[in-house]
Image (tube, rainbow, N blue to C red):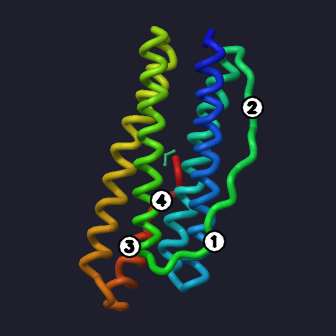
């Protein structure tokens, strides 16, 4: 059983996860259209992961007998200047997601809601890995600079990412 306040906060987070999925699908389309097939695949896998994150909140709400409220999903940007800009936006977005998850945790702690705390801890741990991956990719892209050959090598590497679990 969760409070109405936590129910609303989880539904808001569910919407942010769906927006994340939408954003990464837009990046996947743009990267592929620009010839970066590896990055296109990387973002497609990320799109699937975000759908999984949204569904985990969805299932939790239902397990608690709480209501699922699906709100409008904001339209994402459609084009990015470079792979570097794409991953820069990704890191910035994930930092925003981490902040919103921390706020959700604050609410759960204040309400002594231990079940929600356990759930949100899973996401917070996941965020450490997501941000670290983005930082690694960004530093590789930074080193590549304007070298198309090196960018294509990085793109090939990104394409090796396995399917979302
Ligand atoms: Fe759902 Fe990218 O965190």
Contact, mark 1 vs mark 2 (Cβ under 8 Å): no
Q: Residue at x 54, y 59 (%)?
A: 45
| Location of mark 1 (residue) | 78
* Residue 22, horizontal then vertical, whole percent: 64, 57
The quarter holding residue 63 reads top right
Q: Is mark 2 within 8 Å of ligand 1?
A: no
**Which mark identifies residue 157?**
3
* Residue 119, horizontal then vertical, whole percent: 49, 25
* Residue 112, horizontal then vertical, whole percent: 45, 8
Q: Nearer the viewer, residue 86 or 122?
A: 86
CA gap between label 1 and label 3 equals 24 Å
**SS type, badge 1:** loop
Q: Nearer the viewer, residue 109 or 144?
A: 109
The quarter holding residue 28 reads bottom right
* Residue 51, horizontal then vertical, whole percent: 62, 46
CA gap between label 3 and label 2 equals 38 Å
* Sequence order check, earlier mark of 1 and 3: 1
| Location of mark 2 (residue) | 69
| Location of mark 4 (residue) | 162
């Amino acid at each position: 059983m969760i409070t109405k306040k936590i129910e609303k906060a989880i539904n808001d987070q569910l919407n942010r996860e769906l927006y994340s999925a939408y954003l990464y699908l837009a990046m996947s389309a743009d990267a592929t259209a620009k010839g970066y097939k590896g990055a296109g695949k990387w973002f497609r896998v990320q799109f699937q992961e975000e759908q999984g994150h949204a569904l985990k909140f969805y299932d939790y709400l239902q397990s608690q007998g709480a209501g699922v409220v699906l709100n409008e999903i904001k339209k994402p940007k459609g084009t990015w200047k470079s792979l570097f800009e794409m991953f820069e936006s990704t890191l910035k977005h994930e930092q925003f997601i981490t902040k919103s998850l921390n706020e959700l945790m604050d609410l759960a702690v204040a309400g002594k809601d231990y079940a929600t705390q356990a759930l949100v801890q899973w996401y917070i741990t996941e965020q450490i890995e997501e941000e670290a991956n983005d930082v690694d990719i960004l530093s590789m892209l930074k080193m590549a600079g304007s070298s198309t050959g090196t960018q294509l090598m990085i793109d090939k590497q990104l394409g090796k990412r396995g399917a979302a679990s």
